[in-house]
Image (cartoon, rainbow, N blue to C red):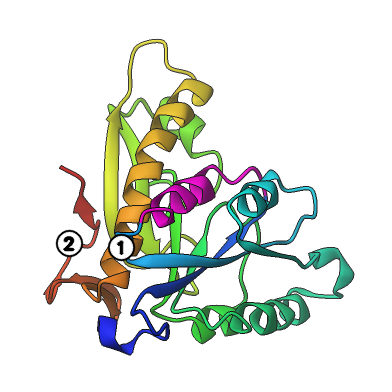
Amino acid sequence: MSTSSLSMPDGKCRVVVLISGSGTNLQAFLDAAASAECDYTVEAVISNKADAYGLTRARNAGVATDVLSHREFSDRESFDQAMIKVIDGYQPDLVILAGFMRILTPDFVRHYSGRLLNIHPSLLPKYQGLHTHQRVLDAGDSEHGATVHFVTEELDGGPPVLQAAVPIESGDTADTLSQRVQVQEHIIYPLAASWFAQGRLKMVGDRAELDGELLPRSGKRLD
């Protein structure tokens, strides 16, 4: 994908963000998009929970919001198909998962293949799934971090794009570790989205490619 292929007349990448909660990563995107130099615009924020505070963040930024409760659907498949209709109404070039606490169906993932990003609080491929901060502490690791990755049908198994590490300090708890990892998340997630918006980042098979070169299987490390 090149910037000339993006759908907005001014060449900016159209982003839709999916959330379920407070939206701290969403705020990082909203802050970045407020700059005229940003390569993308946040077109809409969609939540499966009406009380998600991230919706307030979006409204405060003048961004469109939608709520689609998964509880109103009989199964994941019908919910995801309804989500696709809502998302596609905004004609996104990129869909961002920012604390969207739903396991996505294969059809949903395939529909947005190559333009669906997530951030996971671990140095993938380590610690896929939940409770990563406590698992890192229990394992006695010396570092922890976060990974931006393309989404595939394998949970937390898509091609890594960008990682940031934090050292584990004496006396760390899951909460203190989470707070330090979140600081890095707010840096690397908008950065990876900018690479995509500039046409520099894409998914090629089971790898991420940046500037025409395949990234390491663990992704690029933030310097």
Q: Position of residue 179 (x, y in %)?
A: 46, 28
User: Which sits earlier in the primary sequence, circle 2 or circle 1?
Assistant: 1
Quarter holding residue 1: bottom left
Tell me the amino acid under the disc marked 1.
Answer: Ser
Report the front residue among 13 and 18. 13
Q: Quadrant of the C terminus?
A: top left
Which residue in the structure is indicated by mark 1? 194
Q: Residues within 10 Å of mark 1 (few under 14, many from 20)?
A: some
Disc 1 is placed on an element classified as helix
Q: Which residues are magenta?
A: 21-35
The residue carrying pointer 2 sits among few (fewer than 14), some (14 to 19) or many (20 or more) residues within 10 Å by Cα, namely some
The kind of residue tagged 2 is: Pro
| Mark 2 lies on residue | 216
For the image, the number of numbered tags is 2
Identity of the residue drawn at 55% across and 39% down? 131
Q: SS class of the residue under badge 2?
A: loop
Q: Is residue 76 magenta?
A: no
Left or right position of 30 against 192: right
Q: Position of residue 73 (x, y in %)?
A: 85, 74
Q: Residue furthest bottom?
A: 5
Instruction: Kindly report the distance in space between the C-alpha atoms of the residues bearing marks 2 and 1.
Output: 19 Å
Magenta region's main secondary structure? helix
Residue that appears at 53% across and 24% down: 175
